[in-house]
Image (cartoon, grey):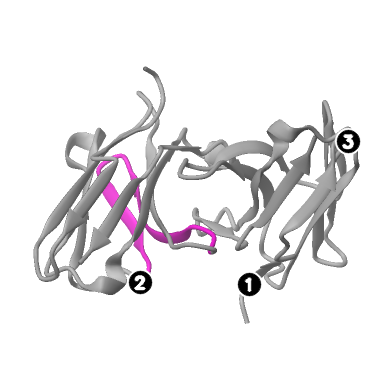
Amino acid sequence: QKEVEQDPGPLSVPEGAIVSLNCTYSNSAFQYFMWYRQYSRKGPELLMYTYSSGNKEDGRFTAQVDKSSKYISLFIRDSQPSDSATYLCAMINTNAGKSTFGDGTTLTVKP
Amino acid sequence: DTGVSQNPRHKITKRGQNVTFRCDPISEHNRLYWYRQTLGQGPEFLTYFQNEAQLEKSRLLSDRFSAERPKGSFSTLEIQRTEQGDSAMYLCASSPRPPGDTEAFFGQGTRLTVV
């Protein structure tokens, strides 16, 4: 079993929809939780990171962490065609230094 | 250009050949990471450096793989006797000293195809 499981998708939504992307994890030592966006044939780009349980908002993006359930989410409001990409969740046990990634969810936002 | 730079962007090689990739991190970023990503999967950790010291290596990094970061600046990843299973995107990332690990900046990757 992988330490980080991500809803596989693919996900297709109309422009303007609210998108919910989700990951679960099993390692309670994970302390930082990140969301990356990856366009085709490009490197991942960090969108947001959070440390504590709760919500963190940045523009149209909201990251949510529930450490008690070992569950994280990324919400995208008013989705745009330019949001079409693969979204990767990642987690760090800072003692280990490295990030553990989910396998990504591919999102398509249709005009 | 102040981002993470990787060269080459694409590499096609015959099975059994050696290949070397280069990563130039963001200036003054102490940590440098190598990941491997195959189609439909998330990046998998290979190794990372704190300055010139290699602090951790994944068990994915067989003895055919070697990484260096001389002088704590650029890094190279060499694969000897390449196999078809080595075909993947090799990603490099850099970050400031902890607790900035979360602010990892990725390069565009080197796509390796072994034929």
Which chain does the numbered disc 3 sit on?
A
Residue beneath disc 2: B60
- Specify the quadrant that holds the C terminus of chain B: bottom left
Residue B65's image quarter? Answer: bottom left
Residue beneath disc 3: A77
Give neighbour class at mark 1: few <14, some 14-19, many 20+ (Cα, 10 Å): some
Q: Which residues are magenta?
A: B41-58
Q: Is residue B83 visible?
A: yes
- Specify the quadrant that holds the N terminus of chain B: top left
Which residue ends up furthest to the front in the rendered image?
A111
Which residue ends up furthest to the bottom in the rendered image?
A1
The residue at the point 71 percent across, 36 percent down is: A83
Which chain does the numbered disc 1 sit on?
A
The residue at the point 47 percent across, 41 percent down is: A42
SS assignment at label 2: loop
SS assignment at label 3: loop
The residue at the point 32 percent across, 51 percent down is: B111
Give neighbour class at mark 2: few <14, some 14-19, many 20+ (Cα, 10 Å): few
Report the side of A19 relative to A97 (left or right): right
Checking the image for residue A3, the label placed there is 1
Residue B35: x %, y % from top left:
40, 55
Report the side of B97 relative to A27 (left or right): left
Q: Is residue B99 visible?
A: no
Report the side of B19 relative to B53 (left or right): left
- Magenta-colored stretch includes residue A11: no
Label 2, label 3: how far apart the Cα atoms are:
38 Å
- Magenta-colored stretch includes residue B51: yes
Residue B23: x %, y % from top left:
28, 39
Label 2, label 1: how far apart the Cα atoms are:
16 Å
Task: Say if mark 2 contacts mark 1, CB within 8 Å.
Answer: no
- The kind of residue on which mark 3 rests is Arg
